[in-house]
DNA sequence: CCAAAAGTGTTCCTTTTACACCCATGG
DNA sequence: CCATGGGTGTAAAAGGAACACTTTTGG
């Protein structure tokens, strides 16, 4: 086996939730060089004895104080350009985390601030490292997986109404969907949702039936985006 | 920044091509411990100054002698369980490589043998490390990307007929598709294929028009699998 | 002429889309 | 009673599946 340079391996997390009907991502403001003052994805180095998913869970708990929350976690892609971190060679495995009503973050170590940003409002600011690319990859992944998987439910509490589910699609895709047609598709996709039996009294209209996530993970036919 | 253990980062390649109408993968037989004698995916460590894709290209050239061939290369997933390599901690970025009529491999260093295996015939043999998992992830990715991308053309020479294209779907998915319906779908998917103008005289039937890959990368509506 | 593959037409059926309409509640 | 959202019905349009049929070559 030839000699090779040891590299450092990190995980970076794109933690997404819906806040005020806006797809939002948790960013931390760096308190150290490089990129001091810039907003970045929460992340951390992988330690010797942990799997990549474990490292991601640890960052969720430590940097985002989301240890106890139920979040969906999925690996997105690994970024490894030699110059992506000015401190040296760091290969970073990007994860996407999705959750319902995630709380305001506590400020972690080496971090000046931490808060949710609506994805829409990120146009102006410049993220640290290559995190803009990482963020885009994760958001693309989330948007497209809504079409052909049951992932949308991970943005919702365990019990939800169909219009809340429709809201997830509308907010993540930025479209408007026909309520009646969506209702049919959702209720007729096998394994997508299951009726709970009770009803929600949310607003001034007819109470909606409550559902929970079904067993299925894939959606076919898929839910189409051109609403 | 806290101290952390340096890890080694490798790339592993799932190189797929069609040989005798069989989806086939290039495997190398290990000539060193651990797993001496077992078949494994071609791979190698990432060096200090190269990007992950560059490392993958280097492995393609060195271990698979596919340096000059045109192959499609895409990152699949990164595997990092602490015990996946008995020599120590190795995080491995898996790539999928697709190409047309790839040649018989030359035997590389630290390798007893190298050859193409039909994916169908792999049931019996046990691969080294976690390479069975890696292989499965890549094949799943390839199979599902045929549905909604124009990736099928990467299995073909620059000019091809529609029935050759249909053959890619049939061989990769293991199904039989209706020739007439496939013809319509392929010719009407914008950006999928472009007519060249000439014809192929392959077999004993009517000569087929030749096409080349179009500009598009995604296919919608997708090509459905239940042929 | 015949076999074989290429390519087109046609029919039936399912799904999607748009939108009307009724239902059930709070105020 | 009215506003509001929940949920169903329905007709037109689009798309998919099955398969017959025509075209164009080699032998």
Image (tube, coloured by chain):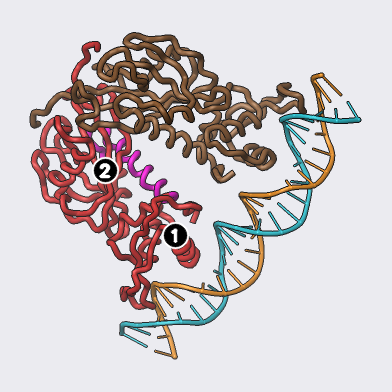
Chain colours: A brown, B red, C orange, D cyan
Quadrant position of residue B153: bottom left
Instruction: Give the left or right position of residue A10, taking residue B227 as reference.
Output: left
Magenta span contains residue B123: no
In this orientation, which residue lies closer to the viewer: B168 or A133? A133
State which quadrant residue B204 falls in.
bottom left
The quadrant the N terminus of chain B occupies is: top left
Q: Which dot marks residue B176?
A: 1
Part of the protein shown in magenta: B124-148
What residue is shown at x 39% (from left), y 78% (from top)?
Answer: B206
Q: Does residue A55 appear in this view?
A: no
What secondary structure is found at the residue carrying circle 2? strand
Q: Which of A86/A141 is in front?
A: A86
Q: Earlier in the sequence, mark 1 or mark 2?
A: 2
Residue A225 horizontal/vertical position (percent): 54, 43
State the residue position of label 2. Answer: B14
Nearer the observer: mark 1 or 2; the answer is 2
Residue B72 in percent (x, y) is at 28, 49
As displayed, is residue A114 above or below residue A210?
A: above
CA gap between label 1 and label 2 equals: 25 Å
Question: Residue, x 17% and y 50% (percent of image)?
Answer: B66
Determine the secondary structure under disc 1: loop
Q: Residue at x 32, y 49 (%)?
A: B120
Specify the quadrant of the image occupied by residue A223.
top right
Mark 1 residue crowding within 10 angstroms, few (<14) / some (14–19) / many (20+): some
Disc 2: CA contacts within 10 A as few (<14), some (14-19) or many (>=20)? many
**Camera sees residue A50:** yes
């Amino acid at each position: 086996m030839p000699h090779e340079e040891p590299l450092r391996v990190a995980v970076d997390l794109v933690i997404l939730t819906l806040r005020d009907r806006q797809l939002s991502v948790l960013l931390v403001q760096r308190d150290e060089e490089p990129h001091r003052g810039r907003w970045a994805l929460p992340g951390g180095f992988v330690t010797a004895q942990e799997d990549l998913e474990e490292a991601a869970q640890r960052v969720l708990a430590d940097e985002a104080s989301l240890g106890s929350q139920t979040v969906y976690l999925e690996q997105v892609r690994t970024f490894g350009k030699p110059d992506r971190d000015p401190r040296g060679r760091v290969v970073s495995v990007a994860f996407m985390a999705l959750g319902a009503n995630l709380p305001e973050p506590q400020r972690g170590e080496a971090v000046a601030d931490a808060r949710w940003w609506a994805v829409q409002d990120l146009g102006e600011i410049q993220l640290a490292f290559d995190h803009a690319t990482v963020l885009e990859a994760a958001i693309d992944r989330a948007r497209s997986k809504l079409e052909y998987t049951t992932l949308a439910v991970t943005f919702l509490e365990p019990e939800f109404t169909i219009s809340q589910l429709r809201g997830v699609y509308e907010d993540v895709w930025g479209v408007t969907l026909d309520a009646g047609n969506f209702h049919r598709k959702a209720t007729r996709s096998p394994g997508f949702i299951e009726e709970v039996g009770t009803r929600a009294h949310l607003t001034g209209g007819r109470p909606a039936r409550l559902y929970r996530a079904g067993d299925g993970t894939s959606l076919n036919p898929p839910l189409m985006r051109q609403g």
